Every structure is written in C-alpha cells, then in structure tokens.
Amino acid sequence: MTRACLSALMSHWRRNPVQIFAYLAGLALATALWSGVQAINAEARASYDAAETTLGEAQFDRLVSRQGASIDQDTYLALRRAGWQVSPVIEGRLGAVRVVGIDPITSPTGFGALDAGGPLPLDFTGPAQLFANAQTARDLPDDVTVTLTPDIASGVALGDVGIVQRLLGRDDLSYLTVAPMQPMGRPDLATVAPTLRLQPAQQGASVAQLTDSFHLNLTAFGLLSFAVGLFIVHSTIGLAFEQRRPMIRTLRSLGVPLNTLVTLITAEMLGLAAIGALIGIVLGYLIAAVLLPDVAATLRGLYGAEISGTLQLRAEWWLSGLAIAVLGTAAALAGRLWQIARMPLLASARPRAWVMASGARLRVQALGATALLIAALALSLFGQGLMAGFALLGCLLIGAALLLPVLFNWALAHLQTLAKGPVWGWFWADTRQQLPTLSLALMALLLAVSANIGVSTMVSSFRTTFVAFLDQRLAPELFVQVDDAAQSARLEAFLTQNKAEILPLLSTKAQIAGQPTDLYGVRVGQTYRDNWQFLGATPAPWDAVQAGTAVIVNEQLARRADLWVGDSVQISPDLDLPIAAVVGDYGNPHGQVVLSEDLFRTLHPDLAPLQFGIRTDDTDQLRAQITAALGIPDSAMINQAAIKAMSLAVFDRTFTVTAALNVLTLLVAGFAILMTLLTLADLRLPQLAPVWALGLTRRTLGRCELLRAVALAALVFLCAIPLGLALAWVLLTIINTQAFGWKLPMYLFPADYLKLGLYALMAALLAALWPATRLMRTRPSTLLKVFANEA
Amino acid sequence: MLLELDDVHKSFRDSETRVPVLQGVSFTLAAGQTLALTGESGSGKSTLLHIASGLEQPDQGRVLLSGTDLTRLNDRARASLRRSEIALVFQQFNLIPSLTVAANIGFQARLAGRADQDHIGRIVTALGLSDQMTKYPEALSGGQQQRVAIARALAAKPKLLLADEPTGNLDEGTAEGVLDQMMHLVAATGAALLIVTHSRLIAGRMDRQLHLSRGRLT
Ligand SMILES: Nc1ncnc2c1ncn2[C@@H]1O[C@H](COP(=O)(O)OP(=O)(O)OP(=O)(O)O)[C@@H](O)[C@H]1O
Ligand SMILES: [Mg+2]
C-alpha cells in the first residue's frame, strides 16, 4: 500500500515539473546564499582563532624600543639578569610569509609546554625548522625545513628565535613579551633598559570583536536571502497541497489511513527538501569561494585582519545550512498537514478559495505589521547597543513586508474604482485577486529593493564623506616615513633649509579614557586650520591646541567614552585637558587624540616624529632631492594623489561583497516572482478563459500579464523608497555608530534609486515574460476545456 | 444568412490516433431564427458550438458569419467579432472570478459598447438575480452561476446567441423562465439562437431541430 500511495503522490510532480523545479530551486537558492555567507564567516572566524592562538602574545604587555627601532640582544640579556621575566620575539618577512621567532622556554604563551595545555603543542626540540600550515609552507623558500601544522594561522610561520634570526639574517629582536608574573623588587625599566618602553597589551578590541559587525552584516544578508527562498518553498508547498487535495481525498476514501498519508507526505517533502538543500550547499560553496578573496581584501583594508584565502568544507556551515533548510520546510509543512488531518472526507477542492484574499487575514496582518513598526520606532528612540540596532532593522523590514499586501489591496481596490472601461476594471480586479498568492514574491522584491536602496545609500554616503575626509586629512602633497630619530632630525633640518612647510607627526599608543587610543603630536599651522572640519568645536580650537591647553579627539573616542567638546580627558597621570573639538575620522576604527607638537614632546621627550607631511609645489623634484641628500629610499615616500587613490581602491573593494550580495538578492527576488507565476499558470486558466471567450485575444491577455508584473513591481518600488531610506538612516546613524563609532551624514542619490527602480521593473518583466508567452501560446482547446471539465 | 457552416470537419489527436468528431457538418441559421442541437454525450455538440463562435478553428470547411469567413480571419479579428456580434453561454465556468455578479453581467455589454442599464435591469429581475449582484461568482450555486452567464449574454444584445446546455443545472420552472428571456431577445432584436440541449421540451420550442450523430447532422 505504501508504495502505491507514494507513487500516486509522486505522480503529481511528474505532471507538474515546474512545481518541483520551483520547490528544489527555492530551497537550493535559500540554502546557497545562507551557507555561502556562513562559509565565509566560518572561514574568517577560524582564521582569527588561528591568529590568536598562534600569536597569543598579543595578550601580554610588551617592551618595545622608544625609537621605534629594534632591540639588541644585550638589552634583553641585561633585563633577564636583572630579574625581568621577559621573552624575546623577532618578526620579519620571508617573501609573503610573516615569520615569527620565539623562545619556547621563556615565552609566556606556553608554546614550550607540550603537555600543559599550551595553545599549540609544537615540538621545538627537533632540528632547525619552522612550523606553518600547508598553504603557507608553499610560499616559503624551498631550503627551509617546515613541519606542517594545520592549526597555525595562514601566512604565518613560527620557529625558534635563533633559527628565525638566521633565516632573516639578523641578530636583533623585534620586541620582548612581559610575563604576567614578575618577581618583587626588580629594578626599574629606566635603569636597566632606558631605550625601551612598556607597551600595554591591546585590551578589548581584538580583531574578532572589531570584525563582528561586518560578519553580522553578511549574516543579515544571508538571512534575508534565506527568507526569500523560504517564501518560494512556502508557496510551492501550498500549491502542491491544494492541487493534490482531490487525490488525497480519493486515497482516504479508498481506505488509506490518515497517519500513513501524513507520514508519506512528510517523508516525501522532507526528502525533496534535503535534495534541494544539498544542491544549495554546493552552490553556496561556489559563491563563498568566489567572494572570499574580496571579503579577505575588505577585512584587511578595514581592520587589518588577515584571513586565509582558501575555503574549507566545515561541518559547522554545511550542516547548519542543511538543518535550517529542512527545519524551514518542516515549518511550512506543519500547517498544511494540520489542514489535511482536519479535512472532511468529502470536502470539495476549492482552489479559488485559496486564492481569494480573506479580509480577516489582511486585518491580522495589518495589526502585526503595525505592532512591529511601533516596536521599531520604540527601538530607534530608546534602543541601546548593536543588537538593539539589528532588532530595529528586523522589526522595520518584517513589519514593512507584512504591511505590503494590506497597502496593495487598498491601492488596487482604489485603482479598480478609478478604472475607465471594462477591461481596465477587470485588469485591476484580477490583479487584486492574485495578490494573496503573489504577495510573498512581492514581499521578497520589496525586501531586496529596499535593502539595495538602504545599503547603496549607506555606501555612497560613506564614500562621499570619506572622499571629503581624505581631502581634509591629506592636504600635504608629499608624505615621508623615516626609520629612526637620527634620520628624522636630518630630514627636518634639510626641509627647513629648503623652506618647505613641514608637518611632522609624532605618534604613540596610549590608553585614554579607558580606550586604546593613538596619541598624535602635530605642528599646528595654516594647513590644519584651513582643512580640518569638526563635528563640534569651541570658537578657536587650534589656538587652544597650539597653546597646549586643549586637545582634539576623534569621533570614535568621543562616542565610546561618552565625551564631547568641553569635557576633559586625562592625557597623562598628571595632565587633564579639555576637548577643543571633535573631528570626524573615517580611516580606522581606533580612538585618536591630537596634541600640539610641543606638548607631545614634553610628555614623550624620547620620541621623534617618524612621519612627515610636506607642502610643496613640485613633489617629484622634492622626492628626488630627499633621496639624493639623505639617502631615504623612494619607497618610503608617497604622493598625496597616490594615497588617495590607494585609500579609495581599498574602500571600493571593501564594498564589492556588499554589492555582489545586493545583486544576488535582487536575482533571488526576480526568481521568486518567476516561480510564483509559473506555478500559478495552471490556476490562472479558469480565470482567464472566460475573458478570452468574451473577445480578448490571448495576445492581449499575455500583455496584461506583463503589464501587471511591471505595475506591481512599480508599486513595490514606490514602497521600497521610503523603506530603503529608513533602512539607510538606521544603518548610518545607529548601526555605524555602534559598530565603528562614527555617525555619517546621509546623502541622497536619486539617480541611483531610479536606476535600481528600472532594474526592479526589468526583473519583474523578465520574470513575467516566460509565463506570459506561455499564455499567449496556449491552444484554444486548452482554454475551452475549462468550460467543459469538472474542476 | 447570419450563420452558415459549410462542410466543417474537426478531429482531435488522442495520443497517436486522430479521433474524428465532426465529419462534414453543414447548416444555416437566419436572423430571428431559433435552432436546437441535440446528440448524445461526446457527439461533438460543444465542439460545433466552439467552431461556430470562432473560438476554435475547424480542420476543414467554412464558417460564415454575415458572409464573413471566420476561418480566414486572424485571431484579433475573430476576437473583435466575438466582442460585438456573438454571445456564448458555456456548460461550466462562464464567469470571471475576480468580478462581482453585477460587473460580470455588464462586462460584455460594455466591451461591445452597448451597456443599456434599463435593459440589464429588466433581465436581472426576470432571471431572479437581483439579490446576488454584489456577490462574487464563487459564492453562487451552479444554477445561479448559469443564470448570471445567460444574463451577461442577453445584456450584450448579440446578433448570434450560442448556448451550451444553458438549463442543465436548472429546475424546470427556472429553465422555462430562462428560455422565455432568450426567446424574448430573439423576438425583440431579431437575433439568432443556437441552443444545445438534451431536453425534448426545450428542443420542441425551437423553430428547427438538428441531431448530431457520428460526426454528421441528421
Ligand atoms: N481538446 C480536446 N482534445 C481531445 N479530445 C477532445 C477535445 N475536446 C473534445 N474532445 C473529444 O471530442 C468529442 C466531442 O466532445 P464535445 O465536448 O464536443 O462533446 P459534447 O457533445 O459536447 O458532449 P456533452 O454532451 O457531454 O457535453 C469527445 O469525444 C471528446 O472527448
Ligand atoms: Mg458539451
């Protein structure tokens, strides 16, 4: 009996191949985008984890050279003899690989402790060798012995400090890690090693945290696409059930028990869902593999985080893709099975009842939508933190999507009363009747288009602000980087002699207002006064900074530490200064404090400026002179134009991923429309045949179908504009502030929206093209059957 | 002559074999005339009606409406003739599901540009549909739907009225009333009526009767 029933059930798919295609494709698409994004995230997280364990010394304080140079062996030995528990580290590059040498015996990271649960059990007792993963090993010179260790971060090779020194041809050290436990009564750093200073461990802002918002962003896109895919699945399941109702009725009246039927249908649908999901996982792998290089570039550009460029098939994402697809299907299935269980044996099939909009359902939907939108409003007013920001996004998008059919129903009823002539009246009435079945696809389109508007507004606003920011900050025509204090002094003397305006930049890392911060000393002059624009400032901020009586902080620090113009910050243990201005800073996520050069030198007398900005009319000539006179290599200098171009290139690559995901969501929405129209085509015949018989040609009817798709897409687009702008506002003022610490001004880009609107119309038109041509080619006898057959 | 069928042939493909349905059917119908078409189930009555209305093309033969050969017209021209000259009542599913009863009844008359509210009002009352006007077709019984379809056909004041078992779903009393309305239209406007029916009674009220059997008229 089971086999007979199953073959009867499956025969439905044979007669409706488009439906099974829609079902599988919907699931595959949903799973593909979801698991693709998850694959990227998993790969990135794995890279961060590997980086943290490999270079676990980031959690320890360090001793670094005051001059920014390297440390010699003798200084290290002197410290050890004085009782300091420090361990040497040397870092360098062998080609593309970052080589790190440590001392396994003294390292506080515990690499030496093979048994004591160190981060990586590496056996340093073997012969001269490096540890690296297989990918990195390929990039290392051939004559280096490498022990393959899969858990080491990509691009990094680890080895004993002596071996690395030999490989790099150096005998110095890069820095010393300071063990957390130090003996009492050890001598001061200043007496043992006056050339060194203590650099506190990077607290809080680990790479994983910084990049979290980026990954959340990707996940949100993945979820959006997944929801769109599930829309397709949901409507296909609904249709398949509706059309198989007579068959199910017959099977039951022939004596097949309800339980058997429910079990068979569940097994059938879930089995198919698993197939769809597996196809999706393969597609997802491909998507991730294509996008990963750009994601890697984005993360490097934005956060300096390195992730490996190759994708691994990790159970965490492909299993989650499979699970979520099957669960989503099961949820869609549950409601339908419940209907079957309650179906009276002799109830007749009423396909049109399913199609007709029920007023009650619309009312419930309107209520739900209103509640969600109110929640969104409340969150935007009172919400705190990144999660509240994303909850706000969720409420806004889902609320708006739910509201769409309600609005459309109202608008179409209105259009119907305005329509002149019977054909237009019918056109709008017919469109309205289609609404319940089309609304899922329309919601998908709404979400895709408004996500596009929102994200592109954010990106373009960011770009506009960023370009203006670069113009402010990169006023000097030439930038020079020097290696040490001596070179710094020579360069300054040379430039002063040449009467060029020099802007030396002193910098160091500090902990200010509880935040890891970059401290800068600048030579206040006309360039700064002319170019910097502030988000908030006292009347003459630069005068106060020049006098050493105030500082300028960047927006990130101001927002994180809840400071603003007029508040004081503690610059050093015995110096508090008021904030004269807050400046927008879109180059990096760190906090910054800007002091006058003089004040900086008083606080850090041993630091010399290692970066210089130079105002000049002839950069090429000056570059040549500097190289000739001081022996500073040309590679240490960069023109303003080159920096700008480079920054913009990083920026643009940064958002390639977002753009790609945007296009993908639009495609999925178009596909959802296509699938809905195709699966509905059979249901449409009884609705269209009478109109045809009354004297509208099939060609006219086909054109009506096209027109309807375009009209609906146009209405969707109208709704997507305010929604997309709301989305952009949330992204710019709430999500960005929480994630990066800066609030961006919002600019509008009407031409872009118009182009997007055209794309949406095109997508709808293309989606409707095939079903419409099929309708135009329908044979008259097929249409006539409607009038002769019992439905 | 309003309608003239001349040596019409039609067959349908049934997997591989061709099943002949009409094999040389010819008849004429003048304005103001009524004609009943009878025959067993599956004899091809509906097919003949579809061909006469230009909805389906014959394999061979001519279909002349007021002297114009429908088989030589393109789709658009035939559709335009259907809008203005012909009204059809099918066995099933005549109505446009997205429109109310009122909109359904007025639809063809408005398409033809002849919506006459008084005329429509009289038909609606006569067919007992006054209470149903704001409902949607799916809320009507089979017989009510049938009457709405007939009201729509009559409202358009066609030159040729083709009806496929229009009283199949109706009780005898209602069937009588519906038939009266059709005859009334013929008398008032000089339209021609071709009606497919199994009922001897109805067939008896027509001017002429034709019987379809094995693809030919007898
Ligand atoms: N589109 C079609 N394809 C194949 N065969 C068809 C098609 N339409 C009709 N037929 C066949 O043509 C024959 C005549 O059908 P038709 O509907 O004209 O009969 P009918 O006389 O109207 O019957 P009834 O009184 O039951 O309505 C039937 O055998 C039918 O199976
Ligand atoms: Mg028939």
Image (tube, rainbow, N blue to C red):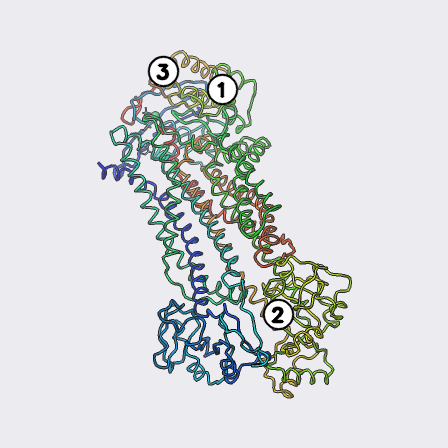
Chain for mark 3?
B
Q: Is mark 1 within 8 Å of ligand 2?
A: no
Q: Are marks 2 and 1 on the same chain?
A: no
Which quarter of the figure is the N terminus of chain A placed in? top left
Q: Which residue is mark 1?
A: B132
Name the residue at the left extreme.
Answer: A1
Q: Which residue is mark 3?
A: B203
Please name which of the two marks, 1 or 3, marks the residue nearer to the observer: 1
> Which labelled disc corresponds to residue A550?
none
Going from the N terminus, do you reach mark 1 or mark 3 first?
1
Please name which of the two marks, 3 or 2, marks the residue nearer to the observer: 2
User: Where does the image place residue A642, in percent across and percent down from the top left?
Assistant: 61, 73
Chain for mark 1?
B
Residue type for callout 1: Gln
Q: Which residue is mark 2?
A: A644
A451 horizontally vs A121: left or right? right
Q: Nearer the viewer, residue A168 or A58?
A: A58
Image quadrant where residue B13 sits: top left
**Residue A519 shows in this picture:** yes
Q: Is residue A2 above or below residue A87?
A: above
Marks 3 and 2, Cα distance to the nearest angstrom?
Answer: 92 Å
Which quarter of the figure is the C terminus of chain A placed in? top left
Marks 2 and 1, Cα distance to the nearest angstrom?
Answer: 74 Å
Residue type for callout 3: Ala
